[in-house]
């Protein structure tokens, strides 16, 4: 394992994730997300730190899985890894939310599609970083 790469990648992916999710949930899907606001916790602002920690942990796990999955570092290999991880997260997070809460299926699909794009971006960010610092 490459500790420097793991640390830098996790930090950069986390920053990207915070920006991406703010754009997606607060701008692009703002009205969709407002339609389910009634199911949010009343103390959600007090619990936001948990979501931030979870995001950092997910980017950490993505980075570890990328390093374990990576053989040649090709675009195809990176894309397949990103799709695998996105499908895993989509089932565990998005589909599970749909099952647990009375939310529109179309919103779940939108979350899932944006999640796929997010993880593909993660993969390409890591592929780029690996070429710069991953071989040190």
Image: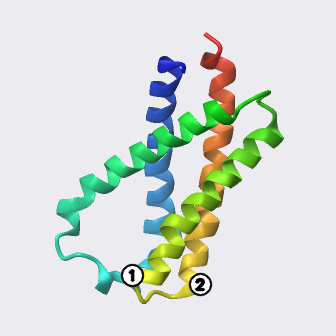
Residue 81 visible in the current orientation: yes
Left or right of residue 131: residue 92 = left
Q: In which quadrant will I find the C terminus?
A: top right
Q: Residue 106 carries which label?
A: 2
Task: Determine whether 83 is above or below 63 in the image.
Answer: below
Mark 1 highlights which residue?
Answer: 34
Left or right of residue 58: residue 113 = right
Identify the secondary structure beneath mark 2.
helix
Q: Position of residue 68 (x, y in %)?
A: 63, 32
Q: Where is residue 121 in the image (x, y as percent from the top left)?
A: 64, 46
Task: Determine whether 107 is above or below 51 in the image.
Answer: below
Q: Position of residue 74 (x, y in %)?
A: 81, 33
Residue 32 visible in the current orientation: no
Q: Residue at x 51, y 88 (%)?
A: 104
Identify the secondary structure beneath mark 1.
helix
Who comes first in sequence, dot 2 or dot 1?
1
Q: Residue at x 60, y 17 (%)?
A: 133
Q: Where is residue 41 in the image (x, y as percent from the top left)?
A: 23, 75
Q: Crowding at label 2, few (<14), some or many (≥20) Cα neighbours within 10 Å?
A: few
Q: Which residue is drawn at 56% across and 86% down?
A: 105
Q: Do the residues labelled 2 and 1 touch (CB within 8 Å)?
A: no
Q: Residue 59 carries which label?
A: none
Task: Determine whether 99 is above or below 53 in the image.
Answer: below
Q: In which quadrant will I find the N terminus?
A: top right
How far apart marks 2 and 1 lie (CA) works out to: 14 Å
């Amino acid at each position: 394992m490459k500790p420097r790469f793991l640390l830098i990648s996790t930090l950069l992916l986390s920053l990207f994730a915070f920006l991406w999710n703010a754009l997606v949930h607060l701008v692009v899907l703002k009205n969709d997300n407002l339609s389910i606001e009634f199911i949010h916790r009343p103390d959600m602002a007090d619990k936001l730190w948990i979501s931030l920690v979870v995001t950092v942990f997910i980017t950490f796990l993505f980075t570890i899985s990328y390093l374990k999955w990576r053989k040649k570092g090709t675009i195809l290999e990176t894309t397949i890894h990103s799709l695998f991880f996105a499908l895993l997260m989509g089932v565990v997070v998005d589909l599970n939310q749909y099952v647990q809460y009375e939310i529109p299926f179309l919103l779940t699909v939108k979350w899932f599609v944006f999640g796929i794009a997010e993880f593909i971006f993660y993969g390409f960010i890591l592929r780029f970083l690996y070429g710069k610092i991953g071989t040190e």
